[in-house]
Amino acid sequence: MERSISAAEANRRFSELLRTVKSGESVIVTSHGRPVAKLVPFAEDDRVAENARSILFARLRKQRVVKVGPWTRDELYDQP
């Protein structure tokens, strides 16, 4: 769930906003009625990296193996 708060109010109640975000809620900060920032709970990078790794490995498992033979370093970096 998201709620909005003015920048002035956010400044006065910053500690309370941090507790709100820590509990899992997102907060949109507005200035003159327009959104300028969004406070969201911090996601651990390990979970994001692990998910990306899982998706990559699943995709690689679906690819067929291609035997292209050995090549030299010069052939590998040769520009067409």
Image (cartoon, helix red, strand yellow):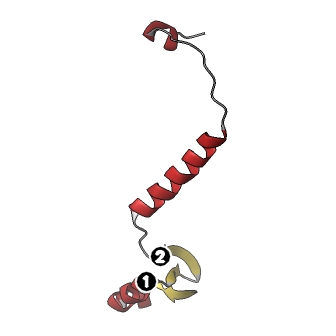
Q: Mark 1 packing: few (<14 Cα in 10 Å), some, or many (20+)? A: some
Q: Position of residue 33 (x, y in %)?
A: 58, 83
Q: Nearer the viewer, residue 13 or 7?
A: 13
Residue in view at x 61 percent, y 42 percent: 61
Residue in view at x 58 percent, y 86 percent: 1
Q: Position of residue 78 (x, y in %)?
A: 52, 9
Q: Is residue 75 above or below residue 1?
A: above
Q: Are marks 1 and 2 in contact (CB under 8 Å)?
A: yes
Residue in view at x 46 percent, y 7 percent: 74
Left/right of residue 39 with respect to residue 4 in the rendered view: left
Q: Which mark is residue 35?
A: none
Q: Is residue 21 above or below residue 80?
A: below
- What whole-number distance in Å separates the C-alpha atoms at marks 1 and 2? 6 Å
Q: Position of residue 9 (x, y in %)?
A: 43, 91
Q: Is residue 2 above or below residue 43?
A: below
According to the picture, the residue beneath numbered tag 2 turns out to be 40
Q: Position of residue 66 (x, y in %)?
A: 63, 23
Question: Looking at the rendering, which quadrant does residue 17 occupy?
Answer: bottom left
Residue in view at x 50 percent, y 83 percent: 27
Looking at the rendered structure, the kind of residue marked 1 is Val
Picture mark count: 2
Question: Looking at the rendering, which quadrant does residue 13 occupy?
Answer: bottom left
Q: Nearer the viewer, residue 21 or 77?
A: 77
Q: Name the N-terminal-most of marks 1 and 2.
A: 1
According to the picture, the residue beneath numbered tag 1 turns out to be 21
Q: Could you say whether the residue bearing mark 2 is in a helix, strand or loop? A: loop
Quadrant where the C terminus sits is top right
Looking at the image, can residue 59 be seen? Answer: yes
